[in-house]
Amino acid sequence: ISFKHCAPPAPKMATKAVSVLAVFAWHVQAEPNARMCIKNTGGSCTVSDCYKWREATGGVGCDVGRCFCDDTSCSGIDGGCYTEDHKYTELGAANTSIETTWYTFTNARWPDFVLRTASLSTNSNIYATGDIQDESRFSLVMPPLGQEGEPSFLMYSKKWPDAVVQIADTGEYGDAKYLPACTNIVDSVGSSRPIPNLMMSLVVAPQAAADGTPLVMLKAYWAQQYIYVSQGTTSLSSLPTWGEDPGAGGYWMVNPRLPANSVKALPKFSGVRCSSMCGEVSKDLTMTNVNAAPRASQEGIVIGAMLAVLASMSA
């Protein structure tokens, strides 16, 4: 899902008041989003200047009604612009020295399933599968916290290096409809997507694994929605979201372990607990078993899912 964009160097931005009529006639040409530097703050300057607070330690300017960080700064989690002394941080496991740590997310209720993106660039859905390949490996990049007290992450796909896991609102006419998706940070026409829509929050689940390993919930940064595996899910089913605790199907073991200081900084789930069809955290879910478990081939998973469908049709 990677697109290349060619553009001349962007001039240094300056804040300028604009009107609805003038916004499309005047704008600063902003640099596009990059993997370690999201430029689109999510702010609007359609009828007025970008808010002054967005100039945290860097500069901000108006680009066709949108507030972008200038060429010396990048957007933080709070939508402020920060210079390079407030860097994006790529989360790494404490026991590795490699440049990028690739994490897998194993479902707590069904530990044979891991989170994965689609294999085709034309499909942006998120799935659960038993096969660990590049589609099921993710890096976690944390922008500067800014005024936010809790971290959120750009959850980059190894298969699609310019795309992140997000929860999108695909509803129309004000009707919210949430869908997990793998989305480019810059869309197919060269428009940089806003940072609030690109981030995911890791929330400590209300229950740990059998070996005491903390489990996490995958929540949209901007909405109270959690990704979960529902009963009857196969490797062909795109995953849904739920607005409260979805039960054990919405808890995930992160492998390798997250750094201890990072886990301490994560928010703990404090909403309404699941009360119906919640499932249980599998007793087989331990870090040792996750590391040792053989994974079925993708072909075997697809065949198994098809057989299950046929069996249900004949029942």
Image (tube, rainbow, N blue to C red):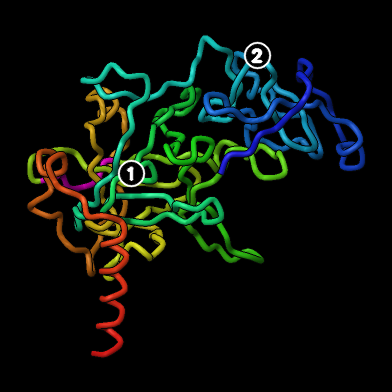
Which residue is most to the bottom? 314
Res 189 visible: yes
Q: Residue at x 30, y 87 (%)?
A: 313
What's the distance in space between the residues labelled 1 and 2, CA to CA?
Answer: 36 Å
Q: Is residue 225 left or right of residue 252?
A: right
Eyeballing the image, is 6 above or below 59?
below
Q: Which residue is mark 2?
A: 72
Name the spot of residue 50 as percent of width and height, x first.
Answer: 73, 29
Q: Which residue is mark 1?
A: 133
Q: Nearer the viewer, residue 5 or 38?
A: 5
Q: Residue at x 22, y 25 (%)?
A: 260
Q: Residue at x 48, y 25 (%)?
A: 143
Name the spot of residue 4 as percent of width and height, x first.
Answer: 66, 34
Q: Residue at x 22, y 55 (%)?
A: 296
Q: Is residue 241 left or right of residue 3?
A: left
Region of the chain picked out in magenta, as a range: 204-209
- Label whose residue precedes the other's in the sequence (1 or 2): 2
Res 269 visible: no
Mark 2 element type: loop
Q: Nearer the viewer, residue 228 or 50?
A: 228
Q: What amino acid is labelled 2 in the image? A: Thr
Q: Nearer the viewer, residue 266 or 92?
A: 92
Mark 1 element type: loop
Label 2 environment density (alpha carbons within 10 Å; few <14, some 14–19, many ≥20): some
Task: Locate the N terminus by quadrant.
Answer: top right
Q: What amino acid is labelled 1 in the image? A: Gln
The disc placed on residue 276 is: none
Front of the two marks 1 and 2: 1
Label 1 environment density (alpha carbons within 10 Å; few <14, some 14–19, many ≥20): some
Name the spot of residue 297 as percent of width and height, x first.
Answer: 26, 55
Eyeballing the image, is 93 above or below 305?
above
